[in-house]
Image: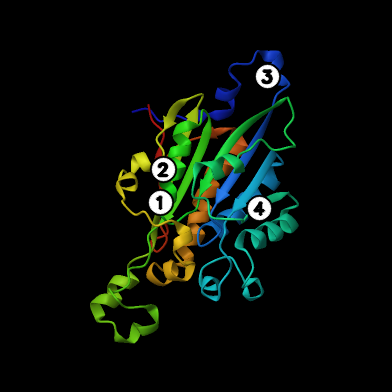
C-alpha cells in the first residue's frame, strides 16, 4: 500500500480553469458539536489555528449544556462559569483571546438533520468568489447523535467530518467516585488503568464520492447501537457520574483533533485517516491514508 496525502483544496478547485482558480478563495465553514470534556479543549485549539492561519472562515460552537461544578474537574471552565452555557463561555473567551468571530447555537441539542442543516446554512459573509469547505467536528459522547451525523454525512456532496471519542474510566458496577474507599483492590486497579485511550476519525466526501470512511463505517457498532435515548433526555451530571473522563485524555483529544485542522489550513491536505492515542503512555499513532 502506498501512503498518500489528499489535497482537498486542489480537489475542490479542479473544476475551475486557471483564471477562475486564481480568483477563488477557500472559505472554511466549521461547525463543532459538543463543548464539554473533549469539545472545550478542541474549541481552544481550533480557534487558535483559525486565528494563526488567518483564513476566511465561520466557526460555530453548538451545545445546549450549562457548566456545572462537576465539569471543572476535567473541562476548560472555571468557577465563575458555573451556571452559564458552555458554548457561550468558550465563544466569548476565544473571541477575546484570538480576535476571531465565533458563533453560538445553544437553543437545543443537535438531535436531527434539520438542525444540522440550519447550522450549516451559508454564512452571510461568503462572497461569490468563495468556495465553501464544510467541516463538522463531533465532540459528542453518544452514538444516538453520531448516527445523525452519519446520516448527514451520507447526504452531503462535500464535507470533512472529524469525530473524536475517548474511553471513560471504568467504575465498579453500582459504585461512584464518592465511595472509592469501599472499592476492592481489583476494582481500584481497573479504574486506575482505564480512561486513557481515544481516537480521532476523519471522514471525507468530495463531490458525492466518499474518499475516507467516516467513524460509523470504521466502527460499525455505532450504527448497531440500539440506544434510543436522546442527549436531551439524559442529565449531563448523570453522564459524568457514570462515565467519568480524565483531563489528560481530554487535553490530548483536543490536540489530536486540531492537528487535522492545522494540516488542512497549512497545506490544504490530509495525511491521516485515524489517530489513536493513549494519554497515560504518552502515545499517539496515526493510520495514514493509503491507496
Observer-nearest of 175 and 148: 148
Quarter of the picture holding the C terminus? top left
Residue 3, image x and y in percent?
A: 40, 31
Q: Give whichever of discs 1 and 3 has the lower sequence position.
A: 3
Q: Give whichever of discs 1 and 2 has the lower sequence position.
A: 1
| Separation of residues labelled 3 and 2 (CA atoms) | 31 Å
Q: Is residue 177 left or right of residue 49?
A: left
- Specify few, some or many for label 3: CA neighbours under 10 Å numbering under 14, 14-19, or 20 or more: some
How many numbered marks does the figure carry? 4
| Separation of residues labelled 4 and 2 (CA atoms) | 28 Å
Q: Is residue 153 left or right of residue 197?
A: right
Residue located 60% across and 39% down the image: 120
Badge 3 marks a residue whose secondary structure is helix
Residue 106, image x and y in percent?
A: 61, 56
Quarter of the picture holding the N terminus? top left
Label annotation for residue 190: none
Label annotation for residue 144: 1
Q: Quadrant of residue 133?
A: top right
| Separation of residues labelled 1 and 4 (CA atoms) | 22 Å
Residue located 50% across and 31% down the image: 156
- Specify few, some or many for label 2: CA neighbours under 10 Å numbering under 14, 14-19, or 20 or more: many
Residue 100, image x and y in percent?
A: 73, 49
Q: Give whichever of discs 3 and 2 has the lower sequence position.
A: 3
Label annotation for residue 21: 3
Observer-nearest of 23 and 233: 233
Q: Give whichever of discs 4 and 3 has the lower sequence position.
A: 3
Give the labeled residue for mark 2. 274
Give the labeled residue for mark 4. 104
- Specify few, some or many for label 4: CA neighbours under 10 Å numbering under 14, 14-19, or 20 or more: many
Whether the residues at callouts 3 and 2 have beta carbons within 8 Å, the answer is no
Tag nearer the camera, 1 or 3: 1
Amino acid at each position: 500500500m502506498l501512503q498518500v496525502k489528499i489535497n482537498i483544496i486542489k480537489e475542490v478547485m479542479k473544476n475551475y480553469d486557471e483564471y477562475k482558480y486564481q480568483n477563488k478563495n477557500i472559505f472554511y465553514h466549521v461547525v463543532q458539536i459538543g463543548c464539554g470534556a473533549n469539545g472545550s479543549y478542541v474549541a481552544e485549539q481550533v480557534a487558535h489555528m483559525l486565528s494563526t492561519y488567518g483564513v476566511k472562515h465561520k466557526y460555530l460552537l453548538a451545545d445546549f449544556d450549562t457548566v456545572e461544578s462537576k465539569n471543572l474537574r476535567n473541562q476548560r471552565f472555571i468557577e465563575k462559569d458555573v451556571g452559564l452555557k458552555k458554548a457561550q463561555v468558550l465563544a466569548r473567551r476565544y473571541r477575546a483571546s484570538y480576535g476571531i468571530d465565533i458563533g453560538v447555537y445553544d437553543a437545543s441539542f443537535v438531535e436531527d438533520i434539520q438542525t444540522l442543516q440550519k447550522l450549516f446554512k451559508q454564512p452571510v459573509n461568503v462572497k461569490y468568489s468563495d468556495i465553501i469547505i464544510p467541516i463538522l467536528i463531533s465532540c459528542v459522547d453518544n452514538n444516538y447523535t453520531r448516527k445523525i451525523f452519519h446520516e448527514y454525512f451520507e447526504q452531503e456532496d462535500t464535507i470533512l467530518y472529524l469525530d473524536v471519542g475517548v474511553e471513560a474510566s471504568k467504575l465498579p458496577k453500582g459504585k461512584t467516585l464518592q465511595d472509592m474507599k469501599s472499592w476492592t483492590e481489583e476494582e481500584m486497579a481497573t479504574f486506575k488503568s482505564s480512561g486513557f485511550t481515544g481516537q480521532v476519525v476523519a471522514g471525507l466526501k468530495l463531490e458525492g464520492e466518499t474518499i475516507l470512511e467516516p467513524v460509523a463505517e470504521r466502527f460499525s457498532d455505532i450504527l448497531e447501537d440500539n440506544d434510543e435515548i436522546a442527549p436531551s433526555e439524559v442529565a449531563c451530571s448523570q453522564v459524568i457520574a457514570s462515565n467519568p473522563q480524565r483531563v489528560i485524555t481530554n487535553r490530548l483529544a483536543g490536540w489530536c483533533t486540531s492537528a487535522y485542522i492545522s494540516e488542512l489550513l497549512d497545506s490544504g491536505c490530509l495525511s491521516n485517516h485515524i489517530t489513536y492515542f493513549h494519554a497515560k503512555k504518552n502515545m499517539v499513532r496515526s493510520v495514514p491514508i493509503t491507496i
